[in-house]
Image (cartoon, grey):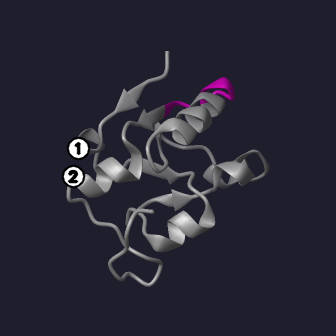
Amino acid sequence: MLATTEVNALPEGGLLLDVREDDEWAAGHAPTAKHIPMSEFAARKEELGTPEGPVYVICRAGSRSAQVAQYLIQNGVEAVNVTGGMQAWAAAGKSVVTDSGAAGTVI
């Protein structure tokens, strides 16, 4: 069974992995998130290194992140799906920024 968490339950300093595509990321993302699009994940998974603790995986609403979290688990990495994704993140009033640091939006 895939572990899940709500955006308000994410631990401070946890590794947040955003698997949305480049246009979604560019529109707005969590300030501390690492970005590896789902479409490129298999080829770029080594960019995660060896995480200390779980990887919290987020997308727009939660389905792509669930797939990537399951893939990570199958490859020996502890992973947790963030339910509701960036839509829930923004709805919770959490910061959404662009790469320049300006206010972003979730598309």
Left or right: 83 with respect to 75?
A: left
In the displayed structure, would residue 5 be above or below residue 43?
above
x, y percent for residue 98: 43, 76
Q: Amino acid at mark 1?
A: Asn
Residue at position x 24%, y 53% in the image: 91
Find disc 1 in the rendering and name its residue: 8
Q: Residue furthest right?
A: 43
Identify the residue at image location x=64%, y=55%. 37
Q: Are marks 1 and 2 in contact (CB under 8 Å)?
A: yes
Q: Residue at x 60, y 33 (%)?
A: 67
Q: Quadrant of the C terminus?
A: bottom left
Q: Which residue is mark 2?
A: 92
Q: In the figure, is residue 79 to the left or right of 104?
A: right
Magenta stretch: give its range. Answer: 73-79
Q: Amino acid at mark 2?
A: Ala
- The residue lying toward the viewer, choosing from 16 and 60, is 60
